[in-house]
Amino acid sequence: MMVKALVVRGLIFLGRVLLRAAMDKQLRTAVVNAVQTAEKSDLKGSAKMAKALELVKQTGGKALVRETESTLRTKLEQAIDHLGL
C-alpha cells in the first residue's frame, strides 16, 4: 500500500515537471515571437515593451497565468539580449 502511494506521488511529481517544462517552452516561444514582432514595429522604448507584453499576453498560454508583469518584462529583456536586438 505504501509503495503504491509512493509510485502515485512520483508519477504526479513527474507529470507536474513535464507540464511546467512544456509551459516554459511555450512561454519562451511566445516571448521570442513577441520581441521579434515588436522590433519590426515603428514603436520606440516603453511603447515597444508594452506592445511586446501585449503580444505575449495574447497567446493565452497557461504559463502566463503564473507570470507577473515584471517577470514578463525581465524575460522580454533577456530575449532582446539573446537575440541581439
Image (cartoon, rainbow, N blue to C red):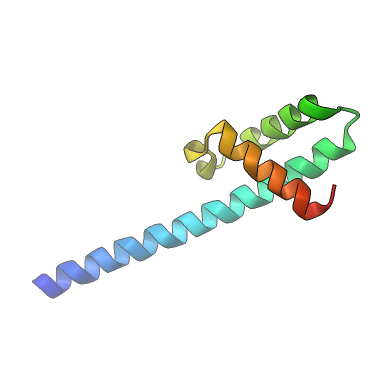
Q: Looking at the image, which residue sits at the far bottom?
A: 3
The spot of residue 42 in percent (x, y) is 91, 29
The image quarter in which residue 44 lies: top right
**Does residue 29 sit above or below 11 in this rendering?**
above
Would you say 45 lies left or right of 24 here? right
Would you say 8 lies left or right of 75 here? left
Measuring 80% from the left and 53% from the top, which residue is drawn there?
83
Would you say 41 lies left or right of 65 here? right
Question: The N terminus is located in which quarter?
Answer: bottom left
Near-viewer residue (12 or 50): 50
Measuring 16% from the left and 71% from the top, which residue is drawn there?
4
Mark yes or no: residue 17 visible: yes
Near-viewer residue (49 or 34): 49
The spot of residue 47 in percent (x, y) is 78, 24
Q: Looking at the image, which residue sits at the far right?
A: 42
Measuring 69% from the left and 48% from the top, which residue is drawn there?
78
**Does residue 51 sit above or below 30 in this rendering?**
above
**Does residue 2 sit above or below 85 in this rendering?**
below
Measuring 10% from the left and 71% from the top, which residue is drawn there?
2
The image quarter in which residue 43 lies: top right
The spot of residue 11 in percent (x, y) is 31, 67
Near-viewer residue (36 or 8): 36
Counting the numbered discs, the total is 0
Q: Looking at the image, which residue sits at the far left?
A: 1
Mark yes or no: residue 59 visible: no
